[in-house]
Image (cartoon, rainbow, N blue to C red):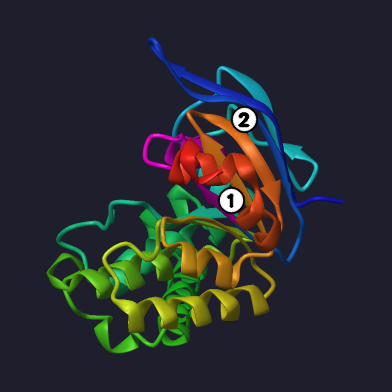
Amino acid sequence: MPLLEVNNLSKRFGGLQAVKEVSFRVEPGMIKAVIGPNGAGKTTLFNLLSGFIAPDAGTIVFRDRPLQGKGPWKIAAEGVSRTFQHIRLFSRMTALENVTVGRHVRSSAGFLSGMLNLPRTRREERDIREQALATMAFLGIESLADADATSLSYGQQRAVELARALAAEPRMLLLDEPAAGLNMRETADLARLIGRIRDRGITVLVVEHDMSLVMNISDEIVVLSYGEKIADDRPLAIQKNADVIRVYLGDDAC
């Protein structure tokens, strides 16, 4: 049974059909990539899956439960976390505080308990902090805990954003161009890290332009072009697919 099943998903912005009747499945424990040229609809697809925008048509089923129509907070609570193409950290907050924000989707203390600062709330806040620090340690960035998040280097900010997504204990992690701005060594480290994340039982869906990374880590690849799915297969088959070659290299390459 698939962990995620997307059926005939569509989204239009005015006269632009950003995503058109896209369907695919993601099996538990898989690393699946979504690729395509600029403007193919990849980030729009992620925004649909994570609840930042609502689809015009189609369904998104995660663990046998529909996600379409739910907001980002509820989808995160269902077990889907994401990072962003352009880093989104909270300013005037430390790296650790940013990570604890992700962890709060697993909290149970209500507004009144927080206002009254009850013992249960204080215990839960300690647990949230400890789990956030443990997540940062998994990524090797625990030394950044007290730093102003937005003062960190680009790579460090990306790591903090990833820690925030992992702190929510997702069943599925959506990574939107995680290798953007990384050098070759950092990209190789990222490939190993994504493998370690999968080893923790987290299924990964990744949008990425770095084809060497995609072919190295992916079990399956979905290819989009002008909002439509043109291929969905294993990496070797994708490399040989005539439609994919045409999209990336032009008609003369086929």
The numbered mark at residue 118 is none
Query: How far across and how far down the image is residue 79, in percent?
Result: 62, 54
Query: In this picture, is 79 found above or below 147?
Result: above
210 lies left or right of 22: left
Give the quadrant of residue 31.
bottom right
Q: Amino acid at mark 2?
A: Gln
Disc 1, SS: helix
Query: In this picture, is 135 found above or below 53?
Result: below
Quick one: 46 or 219, which is closer to the camera? Answer: 219
Disc 2, SS: loop
Q: Which residue is mark 2?
A: 68
Q: In this orientation, does residue 67 appear?
A: yes
**What residue lies at 28% left-to-right and 81% top-to-bottom?**
145
Quick one: 99 or 125, which is closer to the camera? Answer: 99
Quick one: 103 or 218, which is closer to the camera? Answer: 218
Q: Which residue is mark 1?
A: 77
Count of numbered circles in the view: 2
Query: In this picture, is 227 found above or below 14?
Result: below
Q: Amino acid at mark 1?
A: Ala
**What residue lies at 46% left-to-right and 29% top-to-bottom?**
53
182 lies left or right of 213: left
Neighbour tally class for label 1: few under 14, some 14-19, many 20 plus, Cα within 10 Å: some
**What residue lies at 57% left-to-right and 66% top-to-bottom?**
215
Q: CA distance from mark 2 to mark 1?
A: 14 Å
Q: Earlier in the sequence, mark 2 or mark 1?
A: 2
Q: Say which quadrant the C terminus sits in.
A: top right
Q: Is residue 165 magenta?
A: no
Is label 2 or label 1 in front? 2
Q: Is residue 48 magenta?
A: yes
Q: In this orientation, does residue 108 appear?
A: no
Task: Please give the range of residues in magenta.
Answer: 33-49
